[in-house]
Amino acid sequence: MDDNLRARIQNTRRVRTPWGADRGVGGADFDALLDRWATGYDWEVHEKRINGLPWQSIAGLNVIHQRSANPDAPVVVLLHGWPDSVLRFERVLPLLTDLNVVVPALPGYPFAQPLTEPGMSVARIAGVVADALSELGYARYTLSGGDVGGDVAEVLAAEYPHRVASLHLTNVSARHAATADPAHLAPDAAAYLGQAGQWFRAEGGYIAEQSTRPNTLAVALGDSPAGLAAWIVEKLQSWSDESAFTPDDLLTWVSAYWFTGTIGTSFSTYTEPFAIPARVETPTVLSAFPRDIKPAPRSYAEAFVNVVEFIEHDAGGHFAAWEQPQAYVDDLRRAVKLAE
């Protein structure tokens, strides 16, 4: 464990507030998590496991590249979101050994090459990913992901339709809501716009801060491990099923940001403007997990992507590949079949 980090945690000023758990993390449970981070958690064990993954640097991108014994096997590209990293897909890798799997560490995020200048929008990231896949010799592939990764997938599919054979998404881009016309949507899809708007008003404060004042927030979170943990752990816990993460899981995902110093640069996908495609015609499998944020009805998703299969699950949330790896992989394989 890094001595500097341990000292920072041990010297954390424990803040007391009058509000309950519905107003964010804090209290005895969070204090216990900080205490474990300082005295009982061993980052080196997890770092060794992460470093043992089949990493490769290609065209300016760090990727996990798990090759199939069959070089002609289908190619799947797994795209993570925020506030996570490639670790979102760690549990599905053992279930995909018959495929060629690429998991990019998206620029600005943990384990990526350092991001030193502005301009790394979702659209630019899509181009970087496309270039890396081309360098790897993959001309046709299935994209899978959600959150920021879903945005990247939609842009990639629209920009490179001859390369993207199919999509597997856990949500359509939230940016569609800004331009959607309720008059041209099915009744339940139009009603969803109101529900999504209510969610943004109640839960979307982090988006406003990360997209408008990333520097200010980066200073606060980049200097305080307790602040960083509170910012990320709140999302990991509230956006997932209960017991999806052990305390050490939470600390590993937070430590990935701390030791790579990437919390500030991860905001680039919120800060840098880009245009989401109005509609993507690539054949799509959409997995709906009940504890995800803003789960949309099929009719809404169909307005923006070519939904061939819509699968509703009984468990799982925003980090479905981690929470429900087998269900996630089963749906991903449905998308791979669409590409055949």
Image (spheres, rainbow, N blue to C red):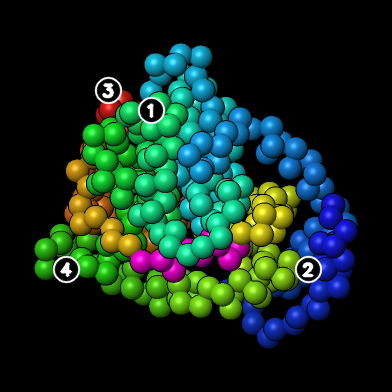
Amino acid under label 3?
Glu
What is the secondary structure assignment of the residue under circle 3? Answer: loop
Would residue 21 be visible to someone looking at this image?
A: no
Q: Residue beneath label 2, please?
A: 31
Q: Residue beneath label 4, please?
A: 182
Whether 313 is drawn above or below 31: the answer is above
Left or right, 255 with respect to 198, comes to right
* Cα distance between the residues tagged 2 and 4: 45 Å
Percent x, y of residue 304: 22, 53
**Which residue lies at the image location 15% right of the left edge and 61% below the top edge?**
185
On whether residue 265 falls in the magenta region, the answer is yes
Q: Quadrant of residue 335?
A: top left
**Which residue lies at the image location 75% right of the left edge and 80% below the top edge?**
15
Percent x, y of residue 137: 40, 26
Screen quadrant of the C terminus: top left
Dots 1 and 3: beta carbons under 8 Å?
no
On whether residue 9 falls in the magenta region, the answer is no
Q: Residue beneath label 3, please?
A: 340
Dots 1 and 4: beta carbons under 8 Å?
no
Left or right, 148 with respect to 160, comes to right
Q: Nearer the viewer, residue 196 or 214?
A: 214
Question: Residue lying farthest left?
Answer: 183
Would residue 216 be visible to someone looking at this image?
A: yes
* Cα distance between the residues tagged 1 and 2: 47 Å
Of the image marks 2 and 3, the number of the one nearer the N terminus: 2
The residue range painted magenta reads 263-273
* Cα distance between the residues tagged 4 and 3: 35 Å
What is the secondary structure assignment of the residue under circle 2? Answer: helix
**Which residue lies at the image location 58% right of the left edge and 78% below the top edge?**
216
